[in-house]
Image (spheres, rainbow, N blue to C red):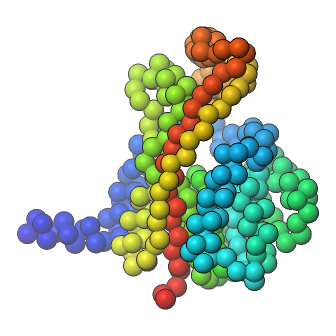
């Protein structure tokens, strides 16, 4: 009897919705201080996002994801795409070169300014802009119902629950795509300092691709899914490293003089020849599904 009950629960998308929402309470995002606004964080990251656009790790990620979507036979010249959380435009620009139109949704005004600048520099005229938070989008009121052939989201914190997935589906007439973390992310400096400040390992990233995968699967969709590992090494001046770490931890604790001193000592002790090196490792999951039965 107990086994039969469990089997029924496992096949119920509502069960995975509950699990997903409960898991969100144990993530890094859940530890963010309420007085630190998310948009303020991303506006402060605008120059970094602009710099990342030209870096090799960004190009590799864009190539990997777009190649995978091409293998799934997603793109065609007449399609219209919604890019949620477009950032500085890495995917927006790449996709716009293959399709009829892209609508780039980006709520952070400073990031949107970078995005517009990059689009102009790329000489593209088939991109429209929507400066609004995904959480505040109403597909009906914003006239987005079934407007797009592909609704695309890569590492978007707002895609964090079934409601966000349902809105993606509502806006799509054919495909939805989501890229997110697949279980873990490792950055030595952040992890070491987190243990120093909080006496525990750093929690997992905000979202885990396994939850939307299971939710969609048991909701009757037939998603395509793959995982890959992303690795890179960053080389920063000590000043850049200290500034970046202070801003990161500002989201989770008050950056007092003692916190600043700890971060400065950590970076200074590990810098060599005026360069601080930090590694970044993460698993990414790619999830693609059709929003209509085949």
Task: Tell me where residue 40 appears, x and y as whole percent.
Answer: 72, 41
Q: State the residue in front, 131 or 56.
A: 56
Residue 100 quadrant:
bottom right
- The residue nearer to you, when weighing 1 against 117, is 117
Image quadrant where one finds the N terminus: bottom left
- Image location (x, y in percent) of residue 161: 48, 60
Q: Position of residue 95 (x, y in %)?
A: 73, 67
Is 57 on the left-hand or right-hand side of 219? right
Residue at image location 73% in from the left, 77% down from the top: 80
Please indicate whether residue 97 sits to the left or right of residue 246 in the image: right
Q: In the rendered image of this protein, does residue 43 appear above or below residue 162?
A: above
Q: How many marks?
A: 0
Residue occupying the point 71% across, 26% down: 236
Quarter of the figure with residue 122: bottom right
At 86% across and 54% down in the image, what residue appears? 118
Residue 141 visible to an observer of this rendering: no
Image position of 255 (left or right of 97): left
- Give left or right: position of 130 versus 282: right
Q: Is residue 248 above or below residue 105?
A: above
Residue 252, percent from left and from top: 55, 31
Q: Residue furthest left?
A: 1
Q: Is residue 235 visible?
A: yes
Residue sitting at 60 percent across and 28 percent down?
Answer: 278
Residue that protrudes farthest toward the bottom in the picture:
294
């Amino acid at each position: 009897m107990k086994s039969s009950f469990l089997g029924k629960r496992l096949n119920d998308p509502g069960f995975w919705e509950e699990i997903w929402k409960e898991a969100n309470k144990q993530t890094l995002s859940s530890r963010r201080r309420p007085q630190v606004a998310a948009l303020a964080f991303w506006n402060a990251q605008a120059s970094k996002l602009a710099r990342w656009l030209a870096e090799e790790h960004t190009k590799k990620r864009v190539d990997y994801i777009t190649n995978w979507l091409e293998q799934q036979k997603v793109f065609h010249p007449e399609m219209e795409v919604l890019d949620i959380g477009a950032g500085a435009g890495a995917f927006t620009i790449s996709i716009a070169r293959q399709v009829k139109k892209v609508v780039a949704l980006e709520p952070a005004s400073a990031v949107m300014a970078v995005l517009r600048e990059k689009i102009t520099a790329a000489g593209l005229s088939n991109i429209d802009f929507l400066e609004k938070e995904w959480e505040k989008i109403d597909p009906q009121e914003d006239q987005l119902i079934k407007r797009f052939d592909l609704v695309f989201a890569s590492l978007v914190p707002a895609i964090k629950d079934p409601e966000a997935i349902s809105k993606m589906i509502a806006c799509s007439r054919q495909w939805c795509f989501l890229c997110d973390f697949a279980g873990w992310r490792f950055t030595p400096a952040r992890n070491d300092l987190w243990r120093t400040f909080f006496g525990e390992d750093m929690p997992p990233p905000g979202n885990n691709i396994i939850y939307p995968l299971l939710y969609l699967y048991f909701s009757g969709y037939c998603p395509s899914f793959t995982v890959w590992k992303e690795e890179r090494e960053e080389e920063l001046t000590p000043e850049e490293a200290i500034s970046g770490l202070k801003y990161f931890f500002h989201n989770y604790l008050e950056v007092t003089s003692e916190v600043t001193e700890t971060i400065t000592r950590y970076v200074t002790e590990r810098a060599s020849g005026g360069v601080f090196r930090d590694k970044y490792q993460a698993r990414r999951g790619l999830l693609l599904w059709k929003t209509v039965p085949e």
